[in-house]
Amino acid sequence: MEITIRRATSDDAEAISAVWEVVCAERVYTAINRAFTPRQEREYIATLSDREGIFVAEVKGQVVGFQSLDLWAKYTDSFDHVGVMGTIILPKWRREGVGRRLAEHTLDFARANGYEKMVIYVRGGNARGRAFYRSLGFAPKGVLAQQVKIDGQYEDEVFMELFL
Ligand SMILES: CC(C)(COP(=O)(O)OP(=O)(O)OC[C@H]1O[C@@H](n2cnc3c(N)ncnc32)[C@H](O)[C@@H]1OP(=O)(O)O)[C@@H](O)C(=O)NCCC(=O)NCCS
């Protein structure tokens, strides 16, 4: 299976929004409970700095997943060495190495752009997500209680970090 990884442009907004639609409908994996619309995605992509990005994974021209890299915070340069990642893969493309390929790309990009560490948040019930990030070398650092509230249900979030 040939997987192509590339940086998303605003032309990918529809495809990225379509992936969000599927994974948000699953309800259990991401704290994002409503899919971003193509318009929201386009606006978001336009706000990203040169050191940030969404990277899409394509198989035969179809976007099957993506990974985002954002600065931890933009209100001071004290956090400029810290990035935040997120990974979303369509259900039928999971466990095929797509997430790992995306992470290789994103982490190389991060190293080349002056990041020294990455942080991610994973919902407490998302053991698969945590297993994925552990496989990349992320270490669990703590739990934020009742950090997510979806469909009236609270859930903790686990935060994890990786030094590059
Ligand atoms: C979590 C997720 C991003 C993983 O992506 P993926 O493409 O399926 O992962 P990969 O196939 O590259 O797996 C890489 C490694 O991660 C670990 N891993 C991935 N999925 C796993 C699972 N379901 N159970 C246990 N370990 C898992 C394994 O070590 C795996 O290596 P292996 O297949 O050689 O054993 C994907 O399942 C997904 O999008 N889930 C829904 C959204 C989500 O939970 N995102 C993460 C929180 S933001």
Image: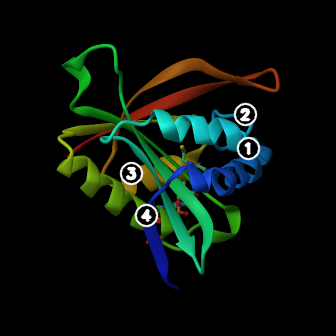
Give how far across and how far down residue 107 sits, in percent: 29, 53
Residue nearest the viewer, comparing 135 with 31: 31
Q: What is the three-letter code of the residue carrying label 1?
A: Cys
Q: Earlier in the sequence, mark 1 or mark 2?
A: 1
Whether 12 is drawn above or below 40: the answer is below
SS state under label 1: helix
Pointer 2 residue Cβ closer than 8 Å to ligand 1: no
Q: What is the three-letter code of the residue carrying label 3?
A: Arg
Look at discs 2 and 3 and give the one toward the viewer: 2
Residue under circle 1? 24
Look at discs 1 and 3 and give the one toward the viewer: 1
SS state under label 2: loop
Residue under circle 3? 134
Residue under circle 2? 33
Q: Earlier in the sequence, mark 2 or mark 3?
A: 2
Label 4 near label 2: C-beta < 8 Å?
no
Q: Earlier in the sequence, mark 3 or mark 4?
A: 4
Residue under circle 4? 6
| Left or right for 128, reference 83 | right
User: Which residue is depicted at the point 30% across and 41% down?
Assistant: 51
